[in-house]
Image (cartoon, grey):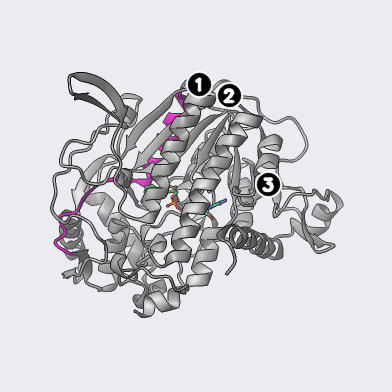
Amino acid sequence: MQCPMMQNQRAGRRAAKAASQQSVASMRVGGRVCALRASVGRKAASAAQVASRAVSVKVNAIATIERPAGPAPTSSGGGAGTRVMIIGGDGYCGWATALHLSARGYEVCIVDNLCRRQFDLTLGLDTLTPIATIHDRVRKWAEVSGKYISLQIGDICDWEFLSQAFTSFQPEHVVHFGEQRSAPYSMIDRQKAVFTQTNNVVGTLNVLFAIKELKPDCHLVKLGTMGEYGTPNIDIEEGYLTVTHNGRTDTLPYPKQGNSFYHLSKIHDSTNMLFTCKAWKVAATDLNQGVVYGVRTEETMADPMLINRYDYDGIFGTALNRFVVQAAVGHPLTVYGKGGQTRGFLDIRDTVRCIQIAIDNPAARGEMRVFNQFTEQFSVNQLAEIVNREGRKLGLDVVVQNVPNPRVEAEEHYYNAKHTKLVELGLQPHLLADSMIDSLLDFAVQYRDRVRMELIKPAVDWRKTGVKVNTMGAAVAK
Ligand SMILES: NC(=O)c1ccc[n+]([C@@H]2O[C@H](COP(=O)([O-])OP(=O)(O)OC[C@H]3O[C@@H](n4cnc5c(N)ncnc54)[C@H](O)[C@@H]3O)[C@@H](O)[C@H]2O)c1
């Protein structure tokens, strides 16, 4: 069996190979993937034009799309010109954020190894929406907006790649979305648990070292999750808890209780970040994000080729997005267990805005700042009820079904999580009004012919996690 790191690097190389086959911006020389620096202008460059400007660089699994020669915008201390590296910028939250910031004049560089696309290929999954390749997305964005996003394809667990990406782009902020983010995926089997923790913890550790060694004043904006806190029987604070114990008082990191190997990887990330803020004076913002729903942002709807991914399957789909698709195709809404599980939620339009707020109001050097990034909390039963009510208004035949809970979690519990800090900095939440559900349902109905019913059911049981290497075929077939 190969070590996960090697598999990870191999996946990165395979992804780069796929990218190079799809893109005029890459070529293979002497068995090594070499990048062509391709300018992306309002008009897509022809292959011949690109080749004439080719410069090969010795970077592992890298394909770059960069702005044409000429002065780049300079930072004005936040806002336009600020250099923001978005790790995981080909993913659900990252793509929407990259476009949101680019549209507002930030200088954006996407870093991604495309492993999320590789998971779909390997496991037989697909997004509801037909998404373009990352190269085509970035070209189309240049065409639609006149803005340039540079692109670096590679694995952040690969230090050589990451350090070169850092050195060449010189980010003022790094927004780190680039992790394996599915709890069910991390619970399929031993190999995927090990991959998740290696990918996430090593990747974040490399980012912290890159900041320390190469750009010490770079602000890290890291995506954590509300799931790190678990469901304690007391209020959840934003990152820290003041405790009086045996007559002494201290403010300590809020206790974390992850409920999957994925959540546990995020907890380890937070611990490493806290330590490096103290030891190396890193400036970090840990955004404990709730469950994200929705798919439309102004920029991702600007052209069909910019459309975002929308996961509805039993591995990567999240609660509300899944219910909406289930309602659209006449599948019963799959409420796990008693349905009293309560979590924080937010609209993807608020995700992108929260990131901008964190960048515009950075943490100080040495500060490990924690924000709880969600706008409303709902139980699974409440979500099912809302989708049921609104789906029926649209003439959909919605049925709610309680299915055995594949997860190990409290199904009825106290939940009251604070989330005021981002609002104090200017977030104006998009709440889950009926109109939002209506437009999401409309969207799902529009694409319902692409839904594969066999991917909807829960595919991974926490109690049956084993040592065998499963394919999604095996997981889905269960
Ligand atoms: N989607 C949600 O509801 C949600 C909720 C809470 C927290 N989060 C967090 O937000 C972040 C983004 O989530 P998402 O839903 O956009 O996930 P996603 O899977 O759609 O995107 C993650 C991206 O990171 C890339 N990536 C992963 N490992 C990488 C590596 N080693 N090197 C380079 N690129 C790598 C993937 O290819 C993918 O494009 C994650 O850290 C996740 O934990 C998401």
Which of disc 2 and disc 3 is earlier in sequence? 3
- In the orientation shown, which residue stands out farthest toward the bottom? 477
Residue depicted at x 47% and y 37%: 272
User: Is residue 356 in view from this perspective?
Assistant: no
Please tell me whether residue 9 is drawn above or below residue 353 in the rendered image.
below
Please tell me whether residue 451 is drawn above or below residue 365 in the rendered image.
below
Q: Mark 1 falls on what kind of element?
A: loop
Mark 1: give few (<14), some (14-19) or many (20+) Cα within 10 Å: some
| Nearest to the observer: residue 18 or residue 249 | 249
Which of disc 1 and disc 2 is earlier in sequence? 2
415 in magenta: no
Q: Which residue range is magenta in the image?
A: 337-363
Q: Quadrant of the N terminus?
A: bottom right
Mark 2: give few (<14), some (14-19) or many (20+) Cα within 10 Å: some
Q: Looking at the picture, how far across and down is residue 449, in whole percent?
A: 39, 74
Please state if 233 lies on the left or on the right of 155 as rendered.
Answer: left
Asked if marks 2 and 1 touch (Cβ < 8 Å), the reply is: yes
The residue wearing badge 3 is 161
The residue wearing badge 2 is 217
Q: Mark 2 falls on what kind of element?
A: loop
The residue wearing badge 1 is 365
Asked if marks 1 and 3 touch (Cβ < 8 Å), the reply is: no
